[in-house]
Image (cartoon, rainbow, N blue to C red):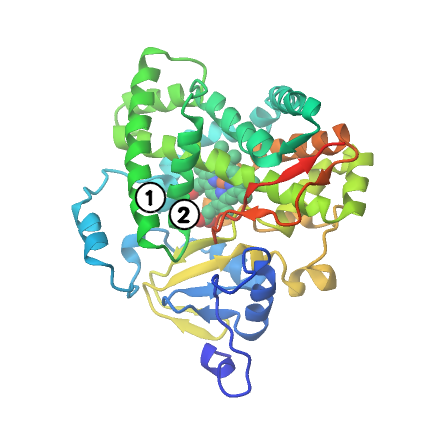
Amino acid sequence: MTASDVTGPGAPAVMLNPFEPGFFDDPYRQYATLREHDPVHRTPLGSVALFRYDDVVRVLRDPHLSVEERHAKLELPPRSPEIQALFDAREPRGAANMLNLDPPDHHRLRRLVSKVFTPRTVEGLRPRVQALVDAHLDAVAPAGEMDLIADLAFPLPFVVISELLGIPDSPDRLRLREWSGAIVKQFDPILTDDEIRAAFEAADGFWELANELVAWKRSHPGDDLLTGLIAAEEDGDRLSADELVEQLILLYIAGHETTTNLIGNGVLALLRHRGQLERLRDDPALDANAVDELARYDSPVQMSRRITLTDLEIGGHHLEPGSVLLTCLGAANHDPARWGPTAGDLDLSRRDAAQHVSFGGGFHSCLGAHLARLEGQVAIGTLVRRFPALDLATDAPEWNGRIVLRGLTRLPLRLA
Ligand code: HEM
């Protein structure tokens, strides 16, 4: 079936359309229609979005697909002269981060960073993560209310990744948060001129700051990830100076943006499913599976992207080289063909919850997944047990308006 088959007379008009009212409150309804009627969907921008679990997994695991933008053959809509001038004036960076690189560069860079993210090393951080969560909850307990995002979901992963990298907590935290928000907005398929301008400014600001941090770290080495990366750079042919800065920015941003959404989306889902929240509160043995189920139920990352280098057949469709594939992780996580009739339910004891694709798949699968799971388990488990009467203090949570990195900007809670 193709898009034209289902948009003919009498057929439902299906289109991936984040402008549809209610999309940010619940994108899963639109995904369900698309998965049913046009699972290999050509978007108005020419990319091809995939909504079925099997298609998404197959694409993520296909080692012959690329992540490098230069291979994409997309007819982009014309830009305004002012925005085009901004693009033309930008100097190309001398390097990229691993998320945007194919092998062999991807593998070389990933090997350098992966040592720090093994399950064992990450498990060693548990006492520190617990102490941070306790301190953040101590700070809000007397007031009897909190904004989950500002008081826990953002600062926790931000401090954890800063400490892992060996960077002192920055007085510029809020500016960094704003910059990362503007940068990650670029993952979305549709951007306004203002968003493009903000993303460029943020990228320049972050680049400058990351260079300053590297310079500072050279004179303050420690037992941390950034010192390790600098050693690899000084070694000469393992990591160039620009590559070092690019990986630092990626880790800084990937290390907190996504985990903030995991904690925010996860707590909201629990508060909307009181019975599940109570099960978790009464049974800490559920923590690990609960976090995977919450990541499945409302994924912090809704889409990733691959580009075909050769002809590809998928779901009866033929794709030319240079096609851009959007793997819709959120839709795959709710596909009844994979999860059965309870696909759309929240079930913290779901047996195969960890088979979700919220951490991607294949060789770009999330490097920080163990860390994200640890932070999610400690933050959410501790919160629901410390405040047994925890409740929403709003009927209208504020979504961040991002299609790809789906999360909340504010979530006011009553603690007692
Ligand atoms: C709940 C939290 C998180 C989610 C949902 C998440 C999700 C993802 C996804 C879907 C990808 C693959 C993107 C693709 O296939 O194109 C990815 C890659 C990556 N993530 Fe995460 N992430 C999370 C937390 C973290 C953390 C805490 C870190 C680091 C400290 C991190 C570091 C990375 C890196 C470095 C990559 C690139 C891997 C590569 O290209 O080989 N992530 N993440």
* Quadrant into which the C terminus falls: top right
In the displayed structure, 347 sits above or below 318; it is above
In the displayed structure, 52 sits above or below 299; it is below
User: Percent x, y for residue 383?
Assistant: 70, 31
Q: Residue 367: in sight, yes or no?
A: no
- Residue type marked 2: Lys
Q: In front here: 333 or 105?
A: 333
Report which residue position mark 1 lands on. Answer: 199
Q: Residue at x 18, y 42 (%)?
A: 91
In the displayed structure, 374 sits above or below 6; it is above
Describe residue 332's horizontal placement relative to residue 77 as left or right. Answer: right
- Residue type marked 1: Ala
Of the residues under marks 1 and 2, which one precedes in the sequence? 2
Q: Mark 1 and mark 2: span between their CA atoms?
A: 7 Å
Residue 185 has which mark? 2
| Crowd band around label 2 with a 10 angstrom C-alpha radius: few (<14), some (14–19), many (20+) | many
Q: Secondary structure at mark 2?
A: helix
| Crowd band around label 1 with a 10 angstrom C-alpha radius: few (<14), some (14–19), many (20+) | many
Most distant residue in the bottom direction: 9
Describe residue 45's horizontal placement relative to residue 273 as left or right. Answer: left
Residue 167 location, quadrant: top left
User: Percent x, y for residue 273?
Assistant: 75, 49
Describe residue 334's horizontal placement relative to residue 112 as left or right. Answer: right
Q: Secondary structure at mark 1?
A: helix
Q: In front here: 358 or 178?
A: 178
User: Percent x, y for residue 287?
Assistant: 72, 36
Q: In front here: 104 or 336?
A: 336
User: Percent x, y for residue 315?
Assistant: 50, 71
Q: Residue at x 45, y 15 (%)?
A: 223
Residues marked 1 and 2 touching at CB (< 8 Å) = yes
